[in-house]
Image (cartoon, helix red, strand yellow):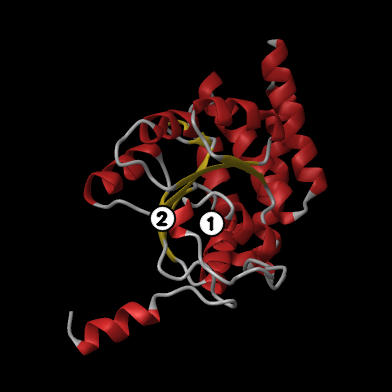
């Protein structure tokens, strides 16, 4: 290794302000708003981020690259993130840290049973909590030395990313409203609403999910949710 390589390696060593420097984090998340939050958290922490918005994209990425950390949303458009977690938790050499995320905290046990090292409930906005979730689960030989106090900070994603999520929800609503599509829509909107602190939208998504679980007609709940999604799209356009 020549001097320039030594300097480059030194630049990748973690510091107190950037404790995740040198790590590459694959974020598997279909919400632009949630992903923007994670991008900011990675940026503030020094980590490099790669993004996949579905299982297919994540699997394609993992064939080419081996990230240090995988953060996977439990609800994805083409299946459950627990499928991916189960797959990568059994691959050798194993990804150092596998974390599951969801706006539904009841999914924690399912994710941990699938092989996740930890679970983070949305919204994920605390820099210190995010960093600690990763640092505390790194193997001993990858633990940064001398880094004890983590500087806390709360991040706020760009609301344009929230509008992107509403546009995605509107696209889903324009499709055939079959059972699986509605189940995905309910969990997607609920997660986005919780991340954005939009309680009325979260309630509408929860009502749709409850009716689906009970096997009840969902025409009213779907129409209410569609109206709220459209209202938020128009509100953001006006801004």
Q: Secondary structure at mark 1?
A: helix
Q: Between residues 199 and 177, which one lies in front from this camera angle?
A: 199
Nearer-the-camera pick, 168 or 32: 32
Does label 1 or label 2 sit earlier along the sequence?
Answer: 1
- CA–CA distance between discs 1 and 2? 8 Å
Q: Position of residue 120 (x, y in %)?
A: 64, 45
Q: For this rendering, which residue is in front, 192 or 105?
A: 105
**21 or 154: nearer the eye?**
21
Picture disc at residue 35:
1
- Residue at image point 58% right, 65% down: 41
Marks counted in the figure total 2
Q: Is residue 201 above or below residue 221?
A: below
Q: Position of residue 2 (x, y in %)?
A: 17, 85
Quadrant (top left, top right, bottom left, bottom right) of the C terminus: bottom right
* Residue 237 position within the rendered picture, expressed as x and y whole percent measured from the top left: 63, 66
Q: Residues within 10 Å of mark 2 (few under 14, many from 20)?
A: some
Label at residue 51: 2
In the rendering, which numbered label is found on residue 158? none
Which residue is drawn at the image coordinates 71% and 55% (left, top)?
196
Residue pictured at 23% horizontal, 82% vertical = 5
Q: Is residue 210 above or below residue 190?
A: above
User: Marks 2 and 1: in contact by CB < 8 Å?
Assistant: yes
């Amino acid at each position: 290794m020549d001097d320039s390589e030594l300097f480059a390696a030194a630049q990748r060593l973690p510091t107190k302000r950037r404790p995740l420097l040198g790590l590459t984090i694959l974020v598997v998340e279909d919400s632009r708003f949630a992903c923007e939050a994670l991008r900011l958290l990675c940026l503030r922490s020094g980590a490099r981020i790669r993004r996949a918005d579905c299982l297919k994209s994540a699997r394609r990425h993992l064939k080419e690259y081996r990230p240090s950390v995988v953060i996977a949303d439990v609800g994805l458009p083409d299946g459950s993130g627990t499928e991916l977690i189960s797959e990568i938790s059994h691959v050798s050499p194993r990804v150092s840290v596998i974390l599951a995320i969801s706006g539904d905290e009841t999914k924690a046990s399912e994710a941990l049973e699938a092989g996740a090292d930890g679970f983070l409930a949305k919204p994920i906005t605390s820099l210190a909590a995010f960093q600690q979730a990763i640092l505390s689960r790194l193997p001993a030989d990858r633990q940064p030395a001398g880094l004890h106090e983590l500087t806390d900070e709360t991040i706020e994603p760009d609301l344009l990313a929230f509008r992107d999520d509403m546009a995605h929800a509107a696209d889903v609503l324009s499709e055939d409203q079959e059972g699986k599509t509605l189940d995905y829509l309910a969990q997607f909107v609920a997660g986005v609403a919780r991340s954005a602190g939009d309680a009325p939208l979260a309630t509408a998504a929860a009502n749709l999910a409850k009716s689906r679980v009970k096997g009840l007609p969902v025409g009213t709940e779907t129409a209410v949710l569609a109206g709220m999604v459209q209202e938020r799209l128009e509100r953001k356009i006006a801004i």
